[in-house]
């Protein structure tokens, strides 16, 4: 009887394990966003509230202990990521080109200037940096206009200049974004091949010249602007009643040009038209003989994936929801040069093993698809979950490892490939940073320690360092800076240095603080040189230079004292400076400051110090932090209308 009883108990236990296993599988299948272990732990603790999203099962502690409280704080009616007035997002970019707007989405924060910019944008990072001490006001007028009074020569450019601009387009720009076929374009230009009869040629022809003039310049020349204005004359309502590959090419190139010329919203609207037209003509679908020749299908593939890269990049830059690839089956382009393609070919040749016209586009398209996943994660949660952040970060790292050997940074190649190669690598650094930056900024917002044992923190800091070193080393080696490369160098350098500047201000006694300081000084020099072709570089340089100058003065008060009594004196002096440099800060007694648990130094020389303002500046800090990450109480699994208020409807 005893053996029978034990056998029955064993069967019951085994059955219980089976039920538990099946329940866990069912839970994972139907409630993937909620972690079962979290729920059980909360029940054991007497808290029956279901967490809003899953905690990484591989973590030894819940995300709220790693990144701060999760969803237990009251929310304001208006999300801190948005302006209080929705009309502030309306924009007017009809003025001539200047840098009161910003195509990089990083340096202009005034209402009415930038349109809607989400938490991934550089503007959100700048808002966060502005909340830290010693920062210059965001609305300080800039003394670096791209255009003063219109002094451009209205006469036609010489044929030699036009030829030079077209050559610059195909030498510098084309191998990054081969949306055209060079032979076809030049044949149409010479008259050997008929020009499109749908009216798209003036748009395409003039925008190619404008881009060539822009990217090939080594100064702040505006020789491109007259050609853009000619291209713009073709942008009438008539284009909405037509649809062709040539029109898509012209619209997409114009949109990208406008972003680089600091009209980001104009470009964003225009590329939206291009995207819709591309879908309307089936550019996203794969066709075969006899529907489409191998030559034409390959050009369509190039056009589609160039468009996708531009759309993904613009959405990432401005923090706007990503485009979907649902229903897209067009294959990526082959690794071929333009010369490998012929109109009458019956099949495509084998892909090349080395650099080609489309080699960078192929890799750009792969990176853009990862960027879309990053976009989804950041827009849904703003602070990515630890496990998801690590997974996406590894995807970017794996993408880099999978690059062919000729993408090695240490291997210098000809200009036509070296420039797009550098741009591609720098954009991957940028993606690493914006993925992990919200976690870093959340720790700073919560006044935690910059612990490099947290993978997203170490990744963000390491890649920011790599980015600054890569860009500055290349610029220091190359005496001539083409504007086509300089725009991306400035863009990615701003992303990396603003992270380092934020960390340097937050914790100037961190083990990496000397490295951050050296990188910031090096970046100031590089941005000063880049300013010759891009005034946004001057603006970023001015921000970093002021920060460094004032920080050095401020931190000089914390030199190691020789008198034990000097600690108190230095601390009191520092408190006085803090009160002078923090807007609207309430008066704080030195005794209260000495007892404050927050410290400006988090290392061996840690000293009590009210690094964060104790009154209205807290609201400013939270406002900026809200521009980086969503409050964790959002229900990311619900429909868009149920997401936090900052999400676009």
Image (cartoon, helix red, strand yellow):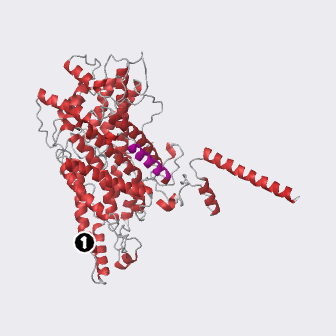
**SS assignment at label 1:** helix
Query: Can see residue 157?
Result: no
Percent across and percent down for residue 162 are 15, 29
Query: Can see residue 100?
Result: yes
Q: Residue at x 25, y 23 (%)?
A: 183
Counting the numbered discs, the total is 1
Q: Quadrant of residue 349?
A: top left
Q: Residue at x 54, y 46 (%)?
A: 637
Q: Quadrant of the N terminus?
A: bottom right
Asked if residue 394 is among those painted magenta in the image, a careful observer would answer: yes
| 392 shown above or below 164 | below
Using a 10 Å C-alpha cutoff, classify the residue at mark 1 as few (fewer than 14 neighbours), some (14 to 19) or many (20 or more).
few
- Image: magenta residue range: 387-401
Q: Residue at x 35, y 40 (%)?
A: 313
| 591 shown above or below 34 | below
Asked whether, in this view, residue 639 is left or right of residue 159, the answer is right
Percent across and percent down for residue 307 are 35, 33
Q: Quadrant of residue 104?
A: top left
Percent across and percent down for residue 10 are 78, 55
Percent across and percent down for residue 19 are 71, 49
| 483 shown above or below 165 | below
Q: Between residue 2 and residue 285, name the one nearer to us.
A: 2
Q: Quadrant of residue 156?
A: top left
Asked if residue 215 is among those painted magenta in the image, a careful observer would answer: no
Asked whether, in this view, residue 641 is left or right of residue 186, the answer is right
Q: Residue at x 40, y 70 (%)?
A: 598
Which residue bears the numbered disc 1? 556
């Amino acid at each position: 009887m005893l053996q029978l009883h034990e056998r029955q108990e064993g069967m019951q236990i085994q059955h219980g394990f089976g039920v538990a296993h099946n329940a866990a599988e069912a839970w994972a299948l139907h409630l993937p966003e909620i972690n079962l272990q979290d729920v059980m732990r909360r029940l054991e603790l007497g808290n029956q509230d279901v967490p809003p999203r899953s905690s990484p099962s591989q973590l030894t502690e819940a995300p709220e202990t790693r990144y701060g409280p999760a969803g237990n704080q009251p929310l304001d009616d208006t999300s801190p990521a948005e302006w209080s007035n929705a009309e502030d997002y309306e924009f007017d970019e009809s003025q001539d080109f200047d840098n009161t707007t910003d195509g990089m989405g990083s340096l202009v924060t005034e209402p009415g200037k930038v349109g809607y910019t989400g938490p991934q944008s550089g503007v959100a990072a700048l808002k966060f940096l502005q909340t830290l001490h010693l920062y210059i006001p965001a609305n300080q007028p800039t003394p670096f206009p791209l255009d003063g009074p219109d002094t451009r020569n209205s006469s036609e450019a010489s044929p030699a200049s036009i030829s030079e601009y077209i050559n610059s387009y195909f030498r510098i720009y084309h191998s990054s974004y081969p949306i055209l076929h060079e032979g076809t374009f030049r044949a149409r230009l010479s008259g050997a091949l008929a020009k499109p009869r749908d009216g798209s040629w003036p748009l395409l022809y003039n925008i190619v010249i404008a881009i060539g003039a822009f990217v090939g310049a080594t100064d702040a020349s505006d020789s491109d602007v007259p050609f853009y204005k000619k291209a713009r004359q073709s942008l009438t309502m008539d284009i909405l009643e037509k649809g062709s590959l040539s029109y898509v090419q012209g619209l997409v190139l114009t949109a990208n040009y406008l972003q680089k010329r600091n009209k980001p919203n104009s470009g964003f609207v225009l590329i939206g038209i291009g995207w819709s037209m591309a879908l309307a003509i089936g550019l996203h679908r794969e066709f075969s003989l006899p529907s489409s020749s191998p030559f034409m299908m390959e050009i369509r593939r190039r056009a589609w994936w160039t468009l996708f890269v531009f759309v993904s990049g613009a959405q990432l830059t401005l923090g706007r929801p990503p485009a979907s690839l649902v229903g897209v089956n067009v294959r990526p382009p082959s690794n071929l040069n333009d010369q490998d393609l012929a109109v009458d070919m019956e099949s495509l040749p084998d892909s090349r093993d080395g650099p080609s016209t489309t080699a960078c586009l192929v890799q750009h398209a792969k990176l853009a698809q990862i960027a879309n996943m990053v976009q989804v994660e950041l827009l849904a949660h703003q602070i990515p979950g630890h496990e998801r952040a690590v997974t996406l970060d590894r995807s970017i790292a794996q993408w880099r490892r999978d690059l062919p050997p000729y993408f090695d940074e240490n291997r210098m190649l000809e200009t036509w490939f070296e420039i797009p190669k550098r741009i591609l690598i720098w954009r991957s650094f940028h993606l690493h940073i914006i993925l992990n930056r919200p976690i870093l900024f959340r720790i700073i917002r919560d006044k935690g320690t910059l612990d490099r044992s947290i993978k997203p923190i170490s990744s963000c800091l390491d890649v920011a360092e790599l980015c600054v070193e890569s860009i500055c080393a290349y610029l220091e080696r190359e005496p001539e800076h083409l504007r086509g490369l300089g725009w991306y160098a400035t863009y990615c350098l701003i992303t990396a240095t603003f992270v380092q500047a934020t960390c340097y201000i937050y914790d100037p006694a961190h083990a990496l603080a000397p490295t951050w300081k050296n990188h910031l000084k090096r970046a100031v020099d590089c941005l000063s040189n880049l300013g010759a072709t891009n005034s946004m570089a001057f603006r970023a340089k001015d921000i970093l230079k002021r920060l460094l100058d004032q920080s050095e003065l401020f931190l000089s008060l914390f030199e190691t004292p020789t008198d034990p009594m000097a600690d108190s004196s230095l601390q009191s002096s520092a408190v006085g400076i803090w009160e002078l440099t923090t807007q609207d800060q309430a008066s704080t007694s030195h005794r209260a400051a000495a007892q404050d648990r927050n410290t400006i130094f988090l290392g061996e020389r840690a000293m009590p110090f009210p690094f964060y303002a104790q009154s209205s500046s807290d609201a400013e800090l939270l406002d900026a932090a809200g521009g980086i990450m969503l409050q964790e109480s959002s229900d990311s699994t619900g429909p868009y209308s149920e997401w936090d208020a900052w999400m676009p409807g």
